[in-house]
Amino acid sequence: MEDTSSCSSTVADLPVASFLQRTLERLSSSQCLKVNTEEAAAPVAVIALQRYLSEQTDGQQQQLDSYSYDVTVTDGVWRAKCFVHPSLNHLVHSNTLRTGADVDITQCSFVYNERRLGHGYMCIEKLTCGAERSVLLSGVKDVGSLPMLVKHGMERSVLLQSDVPLQVSRKHYLSLWNNDDPEGDTWTSGSPPSATVLDVSKITLLCSLESCLRNTWKPLPLLVKIIHKSRLRYYGKFGLKIDYPYLAYFEVADQSGTMSLVLWNELCPEFYQRLSVGTVLYVQNYSLKQSYSNRSHPQMDHHRMKTFDSVEICLNPRNPTSVITVVSPKSVLPQWGLPEVSYQFTTRSELENLSNNSTCDVIGLVTFVGRVERVKSIGNKGPEKYWTYRWIHAVDGTSERPFILEVFSSSQPEVFSRICPMTYLVCTQMRVCQVEGSLPYLTSSCETETYITGHHKGQSYVSDPRVKSFIQWTKTLKDNDVLQKTAVGGHYCYPRPPGKFIQSMVDVSTQAPLVAAADLKKELETLQYREHKKVAIQGQITAVRYMKGPKTTESQGTQEKEVRDASTDAHNHPSTAEQTLAASSTSASPEKISARKRRVQTRKATQSSLNRVSESAKRRHKDTEEEESDSGSEEAQDVECCQQLQNQDPDADVLSWESSSWLTQRREVSEHLVRGGLYRDSVSRRFTFDEKNVLLRQSNLQPTRWTVEQNADVIVPVVCPGYYQVTILGINKQIAVDAAYLPVVSSDEPRAVGLPQDPHGNTMLSCLSSGFLCPLGDADSNSESALPEPEEVLATAAELEDTHVVCVLDLCSLGGDEMEVLINKVYRVTEVSLN
C-alpha cells in the first residue's frame, strides 16, 4: 500500500499544470458531478488496467458485462485510479484501450459510494484512444513515484491507493485475460517455510481417513508430501457472497498412499504459490468430505502407491480454521517415510507408441514459441471466461521431429510468459492426442506444471535419468546452429483439418463448425482480443489477389524499413525466411540463375500477352456493360480470358484473378467483409538473444501494467514476400468475405511440422487445399526445388470458376481493428460428406 500522507500536501509544490487535478477540481465544484473535458482535454497515459467481477445492483434488469475494469492513468504529474464505464468495456475487449497508450478523456463523472463514508472515485464515461505508444510516457522514468490523486476529504480511502477494486464488494483483481492466473499483491509468494520443531508422534495416516468420513472423532494431524498440483480454479459468479472464490487441488502422499487435498477460498492467495510439488505439509484442523466425482485426476500409476479416492481433505479459512505448516526441506526426516516424487518422462522417439489420452512428462529444448491466444471456456455456466494457451515446439535429440505442445496457462504466469526458444522446458502431466493424418501432439491437463531455465533448481525431476541424458545431449549442440532453426510468434494452428470434411450430426466438436455467412459476420464482430476460432463456410472463390507483405500503415511501414535496415547491419545471420528467399535468387548456382531467367522471361511474355488481351477486353466491356450480355459472346470470352490473370495496378505490381461472374455478382452482394488479412503479428520471426525481451512482449498478451521497457520496444522486422488475398462468396451470394492465404514455402517453417506433404501440381486450388507450395525446400540441402512464382499459381485459378467449396478459416482478433482471417484449408465438394 502506498503512503497517502504526502499526496495532498505536494499539490502546491508541483510546477506543471495537471489535467487530472484540474478535472477533479471541476468535478468537485460541479452540481451534477459530471463534466465534459473537450475544451480542456489533454492526453493522459494508461499505466494500469485491472479487471474484476462486476457488481450486480438491486433492480438491475440485465448485466452489461460480466466484468468491470479499473484504469490508472497519469498526466505526468499525478496518477488517478478511475472506473471504466461499462459502455467502454468493448474498448478493453478489443485491446483498443490498453496500457502504454495515450487517451483523451472527453467526459467523466464522480461517483460516491452510498454505503461507505469517505469513498468515491472518478468514472471515465467517454474517451478517445490515441497513439498505441504513449508520447507522454516517453518522458516518465518512474510512474510509481508520482503521487496518487485523491479528492479532498478522502485521503484516508485506502481503496484508491491499494491493489483493491474501486467497487467495494470485490476484494481482489483477476488476471486481465484469464481467470486462472494469480493477480495482484494479495497473492503471497516466497514466504520462508517453517523451521518449527514438529510433534509427529501423534499423526494419522491417509489410509485411515476413509473410515473417518462419518465419524464425529476429530482427525489427528497429517504429515504429507505434495506429488501433484492443479491450476487455480475461480468459481466466482453474481450473488456469491464469498470474497475469494478460488479452489486448488493437490495430490498428497504419505507412506500409506495418496489422497486429494483441496485448498479453499482465502487460503489460496495465502498458500497457493508457496505450495509446490515436493513440498511437505503438516496439516491440522482439516475436514473431510466425499470426493467430487466429475473432476479430473492426474495419472499416478507410475507412483505405485495405493490411491484413496472416495474422500477429499478440505483446508478451509473457517469452520474449521485449518492450520497449515510448510515444512522446511532441511527439517524433513527420512524416518517419516514420505515417498519420493516420481515422473514418467517420454522421449520424442517413443511418442507415436503412446495411446491416445494417456499422460506423460516431457523435457525438450524449445525451438518455436507461438503467440499467446485465448479460447472461450467450454461448458462454463458462470460469467464468461477464457483460457490462454500457446503452441510450442521442443526437441530432445531422439528424433528429427519436435514435440508439438499445446500449453495452456497453468497458474504460473511468471513461467508461461517467459517461454522462449533456446530454453529447457519441462511439462508434466501432458495428455497425448493421436490424430489421424497428423503427427501426435501433447496438450495440457488441469495438473500440468511447466518449468523453464531458471526454475529447474531444486525440482524433484533433476535427478531423473532421462533428464540427465537430455542435458548431456544439449552439451553437444552449437547455439548458432540451433538459432537458425528457431522462430517466435505468428499464426499457428494444429492439427491440420482432415483430408475429408465430415459434418457430424452427433459430435459437433470433431472439427470446425460449418456456419452461415451471416454468422461469420457475427463471429468477427464479437471476437475479443487474441481470441481464436476455427469455422467453415461454404461458397465459391470469386477473386484472388497476390499482395506484397503484411498489412501495415504507411508510418509503420517506414518504421519497419528503418528497423529492417538497422537489423541487417546488426545481425550476421539472416533469418530462415531470408535464407529461403536468397536460395531462390542470388545464392543460386549460375545454371539455376539461367534457368530462372528463362522462366521469368517466359512469364513476362505471358503476362504481356495477357495484359494486351486485358486492355482490349476492358474497352469492349466498358462499351457494353449497360447492355445484357450473352455468356457465349466473343466479348464475354475475351473478358473471361483476361480475368485468368491480370495486373490491375501496374504501379503496385499486384497480380490478381477474378471469376467471369464476379463483376456482376458483387453488385448484388449485400455486404463484403473486408476486415480480414495478414498482419505483422501473423508472421513468425526468427529468435535472437538481442531481441529476446521485445519478441516476448510482442508474442505475449497486453500486460496489465506498463513498464518503461514496453515503450522502448522497437518493431522487430517481418520477412514475408507476400500472401494471397482470397474473396469467398457465400453459397447464397449475399455476403462475401476476404481471407488471407499464406502458404508454407519451406520445411524449416514451424507450420511445416506435421503438415501432410503429398505432392500436388501447384494449382491455385491444390495449394489452398494442401496449405503449401510443392515441393517444400530444405535450407540444409542443395537440391533444386524452385518454387512456382505467384503469377504461375494464379495462371491456374480458372479451375476455381463456379466451383462449390468449403473453406476452413482461422479467425483471431489481434487487437484494435486488426482482424486476422486466414484460410486453413479448402475442400472440393467431392471431399465433403455428412455423417
Image (cartoon, grey):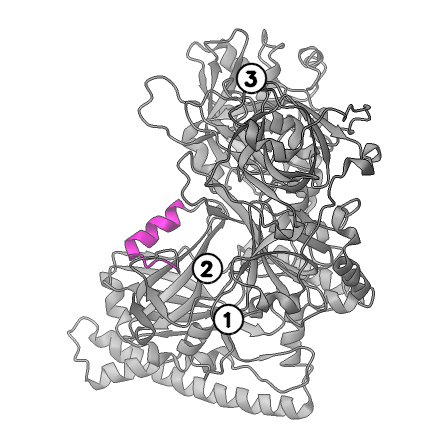
Label 3: element kind: loop
Q: Bounds of the magenta span?
A: 512-526
Q: Which residue is mark 3?
A: 319
Task: Determine whether 515 is above or below 134 in the image.
Answer: below
Which image quarter holds the C terminus? bottom left
Q: Which residue is mark 2?
A: 677
Label 2: element kind: loop
Looking at the rendered structure, the kind of residue marked 1 is Pro
Question: Which of the 4 image quarters holds residue 825?
Answer: bottom left
Q: Residue at x 49, y 60 (%)?
A: 678
Residue 210 visible here:
yes
Question: Which of the 4 image quarters holds residue 467?
Answer: bottom right
Distance CA(mark 2)–CA(mark 3): 57 Å
Q: Does the residue at mark 2 contact the one at mark 3 (Cβ under 8 Å)?
A: no
How busy is the neighbourhood of tag 3: few (under 14 within 10 Å), some, or many (20 plus)?
few
Looking at the rendered structure, the kind of residue marked 2 is Gly
- For the stretch drawn in magenta, the main secondary structure is helix
Q: Is residue 713 left or right of residue 728?
A: right
Q: Which residue is mark 1?
A: 743
Looking at the rendered structure, the kind of residue marked 3 is Asn
